[in-house]
Image: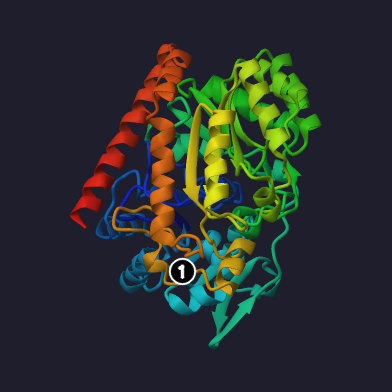
Amino acid sequence: MDILFLNLPYEFNISRASRWPEKTKSGTLYYPYWLAYCVGVCEEKGLKCNLVDCITRGYTIEDTLNEIEKNNPDYVMCEITTSTAHYDFNTIAQIKNKFPDVKIIVGGTHATILPAEVLNECPSIDFIVRQEYDFTVPELINTLNNNESLDDVKGISYKHENEIKHTPDCDLTDLNKLPFVSKVYQKYLNVDDYAYAFAQKPMIQIVASRGCPNQCNFCSYPSTMGGRLYRTRSVVDLADEFEYIIKEMPEIKEIFIEDDTFTVDQKRVREFCDEIMRRNLKPVWSCNTRVDLTFETMSKMREAGCRLLVCGYESGNQQVLDETRKGITLEQSRAFAKNARKLGIKVFGCFMIGLKGDNLKTIQQTYEFAKEVYPDMCFFQQAVPFPGTEFYHWAKNEGYLITEDYSKWLNKDGYLNCLVDYPYADHNEIEKLRDNLMSKYYFSFAYIGKTFLANLDWTEFKRVVRGGTQYIAFRFKKTIHKNEE
């Protein structure tokens, strides 16, 4: 076999494809969608592939080695993230030690932003494929198989005679060349293994665009994978995949559009909705958006089956929003929340504390603002200094970053540590603030009552119970560990 794609094993269920890679919380587990897209392209190029998700199979490193032996590949392709890098390097080293002739190719956010550091830290890696590697991987393999020069393969980093070489970045502009990732899932994965806490199950993740033109200084993906150049699939191509999923995968209850921001081009969004309705399709779907979404577009989305919008409110203080270069106003956030309630679209609202410009007063304002806009589900989280972001450079330059040892990014339970000490609160105090905000929001009588009344539908009720039970178990376990310390 040519190439074995591995979502590498880990000590916990973890979503490497997530913008927030840590242990599964409230049942959320992402598809390894970057790997899956590349599998589809490689197969179209005539390569023999297999995709194995070691996370969902509960594989140990030894199980993974056995899987490689069974497949007998020429190449192994995997991803690493900052929070899993330390563990991943050990896994990769063991793979190379047992199978020295297998070429190991690595992609993902951490490898993209720190290719030289990764190659030096883990000499078992043969090649790094930076950014969007869908077409880079098959080109690299064909080049190696034909014993041709690597200089023309864009988007790779590798060692040659003790020198690290980087070719120019790849350039993927025509997303219609990507195969339907849903077909790859169908062939290699079990859709019941994956879930969002806020989505109906089973769900599926697909991509309608890549890149984000917005300038938020804390966001990892535009700084690493997709870049700032916004590119889209055609309306027809996207509708075709929706139709395929509805007809060929009837078990799927919800389609999640896993773009950085699906609604950048609102005219295109409305055209997509019109196409869905013209075909008389009845999908249930959701997406990432921004609070600048107009009522006209939101109404059209609702009419076309949009059930839920995931948005980053981030802060309840306008100066903090401006410091983060979020590019939104509090009034837009209020209007977004009002419009969503009017149309009956559910909202998952994301809030961050410890952003540039934050202090104890602005963090409290963020909590009060969360109660005002009152999303159906919300997420309070500390800002994380992911390498490559402006937030990382700011925290490091100010002396706030407490460690660059990536083995310390996750705590013993598998959750992202608070990694920044601020003048107004150290990392331990930030963690307490975050947990207190989550508890106050979710365990208030008002929220519990609202959630119950808003989810009397049996499907929604099951989703709420599933996510709520898992979150309560997570908090209970965390409390026990804190008491033990």
Q: Nearer the viewer, residue 427 or 465?
A: 427
Q: Is residue 60 above or below residue 199?
A: below
Q: Nearer the viewer, residue 48 or 411?
A: 411
Q: Quadrant of the N terminus?
A: bottom left
- Residue 420 lies left or right of residue 215; in this view the side is left
Query: Is residue 79 visible to the viewer in this orientation of the structure?
Result: yes
| Farthest residue, direction left | 484
Residue type of the residue flagged with mark 1: Lys
Residue at image point 37% right, 49% down: 23
Residue at image point 42% right, 65% down: 85
How many marks on residues? Answer: 1
Residue 481 percent coordinates (x, y): 23, 51
Residue 248 percent coordinates (x, y): 52, 23
- Residue 484 lies left or right of residue 48; in this view the side is left
| Farthest residue, direction front | 361
Residue 324 percent coordinates (x, y): 66, 54
- Residue 282 lies left or right of residue 405; in this view the side is right
Residue 460 figure quarter: top left
Query: Is residue 39 visible to the viewer in this orientation of the structure?
Result: no
Q: Is residue 411 above or below residue 461?
A: below
Q: Quadrant of the C terminus?
A: bottom left
Residue at image point 45% right, 34% down: 196
Query: How would you rate the neighbour count of disc 1 (Cα within 10 Å): few for under 14, some for 14-19, many for 20 or more?
Result: some
Residue 243 percent coordinates (x, y): 62, 23
Residue with the mark numbered 1: 103
Rendering colour mode: rainbow
Element under disc 1: strand
Q: Nearer the viewer, residue 24 or 143?
A: 24
Residue at image point 57% right, 42% down: 365
